[in-house]
Image: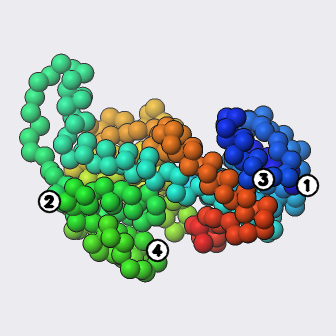
């Protein structure tokens, strides 16, 4: 009998779905902050986010299903044994994160952040011209599920969409032009909006440099809803304080929580949200995660093919 450890905040209806999918398994439910090393070491399958250092390459662990899309903490050497299959929740967050990024895009284009600041000071003022998505070229850097969902939203508003991804392929219908990641610099001079939704991998860390922002239009907008270490805080600060670009929005930071003494807080052309585009803020997201976990659990029990299997070399799904 397989021991299945559930660390996700499931309700009775979720338990029923999972236990039906994993018929014949022994289910253990626990909160992530209360789970013991013994429970983790005895589990054959884990659904949820155990602390990476508690796994210690357990030889019993055959499969780990994350509730996140990010996998960086679990692909490091020594965390999982070579026999452990790692799967993530790719597909669950596309709606929530893409809509958040879309809202930030319009907020920056229409300068709503400036008017919100003025409201707090009871100031009635006019901040001048705005831009429209129907006249813009939008670069979506990271063309996975989230990136494509965002691309569909801006495309529906009339934007020209450039997708940036690792591997060559035919562009999906929501993308007008496809550029490989190694040619990212060619996108900067032509994009009016750069929306980054890159994961944390060796290839994407600090991919945006001072020179990147030097190449962007001074009217450009930069949005980061991927990982904070795609751009260093001091690089982003220089780009905004020196007006290399017009404005930016970040849902992620190089260091989280963003330190209270960070100069980024004081920039009037930066919108900051505290890494809340994902998570379970949109209830539908968690339902999607449970569905992914249940489908994978059924496949695990039957010896079938799992969805969202991660390549440890790249950190992306295979």
Q: Which mark is residue 1?
A: 1
Q: How far is the residue under mark 4 from the one under mark 3?
A: 35 Å
Quadrant housing the C terminus: bottom right
Q: Residues within 10 Å of mark 2 (few under 14, many from 20)?
A: few
Is disc 1 placed on a helix, strand or loop? loop
Which residue occupies the foreground of this view, 14 or 167? 14
Residue that label 2 marks: 135
Q: Position of residue 132 (x, y in %)?
A: 16, 52
- Label 2 to label 4, Cα distance in Å? 27 Å
Q: Nearer the viewer, residue 222 or 260?
A: 222
Q: In the rendering, which numbered label is found on residue 41?
A: none
Real-space Cα distance between discs 3 and 1? 11 Å
Residue plotted at (68% across, 66% down): 306
Q: Nearer the viewer, residue 243 or 66?
A: 66
Asked which quadrant contains residue 219, the reply is bottom left
Mark 4 crowdedness (10 Å alpha carbons): few <14, some 14-19, many ≥20: some
In the image, is 77 to the left or to the right of 238?
right
């Amino acid at each position: 009998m397989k021991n299945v450890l559930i660390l996700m905040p499931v309700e009775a209806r979720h338990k029923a779905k999972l236990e039906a999918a994993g018929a014949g398994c022994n289910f253990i439910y626990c909160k992530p902050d209360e789970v013991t090393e013994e429970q983790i070491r005895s589990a054959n399958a884990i659904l949820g986010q155990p602390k990476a250092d508690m796994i210690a390459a357990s030889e019993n662990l055959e499969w780990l299903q994350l509730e996140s899309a990010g996998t960086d903490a679990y692909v490091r050497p020594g965390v999982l044994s070579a026999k452990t299959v790692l799967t993530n929740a790719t597909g669950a967050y596309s709606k929530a994160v893409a809509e958040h990024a879309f809202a930030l895009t319009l907020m920056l284009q229409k300068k709503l952040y400036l008017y919100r600041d003025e409201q707090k000071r009871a100031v009635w003022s006019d901040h001048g011209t705005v831009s429209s998505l129907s006249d813009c070229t939008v670069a979506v850097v990271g063309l996975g599920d989230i990136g494509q969902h965002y691309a569909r939203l801006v495309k529906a508003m009339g934007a020209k969409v450039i997708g940036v991804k690792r591997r060559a392929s035919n562009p999906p219908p929501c993308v007008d032009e496809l550029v490989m990641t190694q040619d990212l610099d060619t996108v900067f001079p032509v994009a009016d909006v750069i929306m980054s939704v890159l994961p944390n991998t060796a290839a994407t860390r600090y991919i945006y440099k001072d020179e990147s922002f030097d190449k962007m239009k001074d009217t450009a907008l930069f949005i980061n809803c991927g990982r904070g270490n795609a751009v260093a805080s001091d690089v982003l600060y220089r780009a905004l304080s020196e007006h290399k670009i017009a404005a930016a929005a970040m849902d992620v930071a190089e260091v989280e929580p963003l330190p209270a003494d960070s100069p980024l807080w004081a920039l009037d052309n930066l919108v900051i949200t505290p890494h809340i585009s994902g998570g379970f803020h949109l209830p539908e997201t968690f339902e999607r995660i449970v569905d992914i976990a249940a489908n994978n659990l059924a496949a695990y029990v039957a010896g079938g093919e799992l969805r969202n299997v991660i390549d440890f070399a790249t950190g992306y799904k295979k």
